[in-house]
Each structure stands twice: as structure tokens, then as C-alpha cells.
Image (spheres, helix red, strand yellow):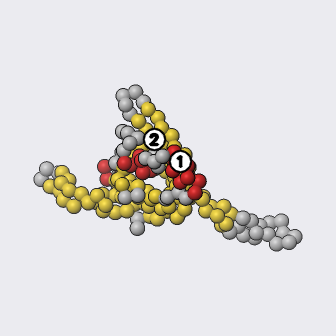
Amino acid sequence: MSLTFSAPKAYVEIDGVAVGMMTSLNWAENYTRQYIRGLGQLNAKEAPATAQDNTFQTAFFFISFNSPFMKRILNRGITKETFINTMSMDEFTFSVVVYKKTITGSDPGVKLVTSVNQTGETVVKLQDCVLDSQSWSLQEGGVAMSNVSGRYFTPMVLGI
């Protein structure tokens, strides 16, 4: 029997700060290959990888632009000049970590989970992330969404 990886069993942590209301996380690792041919050869003999490009995209609910998480991830708690200098000189990277909670206590009599280990098992870790684009949307009823995309420089690590 296979198990479903559902939202109540997982949370996302970005640079040490848990982001509880993330709605999606997508990532891709693409390899660029270069054909190798000898003089007078029409057919390629091999195609070794010459580059790896890693990208991610995520969406999450947020309440305020002034929350510590939003300020940290979007670098918005600073002056305009400091923001421009940071973007053009040296960006700070962050990591995205997805954990699977593990059950540490249950009551079989009433069939309830009574306690969990929040950081029980690492499912995936994207390291050395930087942002490429950010977008926001506001809907009726006060629901606000933010979509963030970027790239990461260290290949994905599964279940470390």
C-alpha cells in the first residue's frame, strides 16, 4: 500500500523559518548537453553534460508584507538604496526544506494522534536559492497569495 504525502504531514522551512501556509512547491533540474564529434564524423559519438540549471517555483498564503517571513524572503524591511545595493552587489541565499512529520504519540482507544515530531524526516532540501521573480495577488475576502520563482545552485538533496 502506498501512502499519500499530504499537507498535514509536512511543512516547509525557509532559512530556519517555518512557512505553514505554503500551497505548492515545484522544482526542476535541467541538464545542458554538448555533442562531441570527430573530424569528418556526422554522427555524434557522445553528449556529456556541460551545465546544470536548477529552478523552483512556489506559492503561499500571506497575511502581511510586514511579517518577519515576508521581510526576510523578499528583502523588503530595508531602504530602497540598501535593496538596490544588495541586488546588484551580493545576494544572500536561502534554503527551502520540506519535512515529513512523524508520529511520536497516539491513543489507539480513540484513534487520535496525540503528538508529532515536526522535523521527523527531511523529504527534500533545495539549497543556495535566489529569487528571480515575485508576484502578488489579492482576492475577495482578504485572501492574499504570493508566487515566488528562482533558482538554486546546489543540486536537490532527497531525504538527508
As drawn, is 67 to the left or to the right of 49? left
Q: Closer to the observer: label 2 or label 1?
A: 1
Question: Where in the figure is residue 21, as x and y percent of width and height?
Answer: 36, 45
Q: Assign a secondary structure to mark 2.
A: strand
Horizontal side of 6 relative to 96 (left or right) equals left
- Residue with the most extreme left position: 109
> Circle 1: is it few (<14), some (14-19), or many (20+) Cα within 10 Å?
few
Q: Secondary structure at mark 1?
A: helix
Residue nearest the viewer, comparing 46 with 92: 92
Q: Residue at x 31, y 53 (%)?
A: 9
Q: Nearer the viewer, residue 150 or 103?
A: 150
List x then y, in percent, for residue 52: 61, 62
Note whether residue 109 is visible: yes
Residue farthest top in this picture: 140
- Image quadrant where residue 62 sits: top left
Residue farthest bottom in this picture: 38
Q: Amino acid at mark 1?
A: Glu
Q: Which x, y percent locates residue 59?
A: 45, 44
* Camera-side residue of 114 and 18: 18
Where is the C terminus found, in terms of image quarters? bottom left
User: Label 2: few (<14), some or many (≥20) within 10 Å?
Assistant: some
Q: Is residue 150 visible?
A: no
Tell me what residue is drawn at x 13 percent, y 50 percent: 110
Q: Which residue is mark 1?
A: 81
Callout 2, which amino acid?
Ser
Dot 2 corresponds to which residue? Answer: 146
Between the C-alphas of marks 2 and 1, the distance is 24 Å
Please name whichever residue, 73 or 129, is drawn nearer the observer in this view of the structure: 73
Mark 2 and 1 residues: CB-CB less than 8 Å, in contact? no
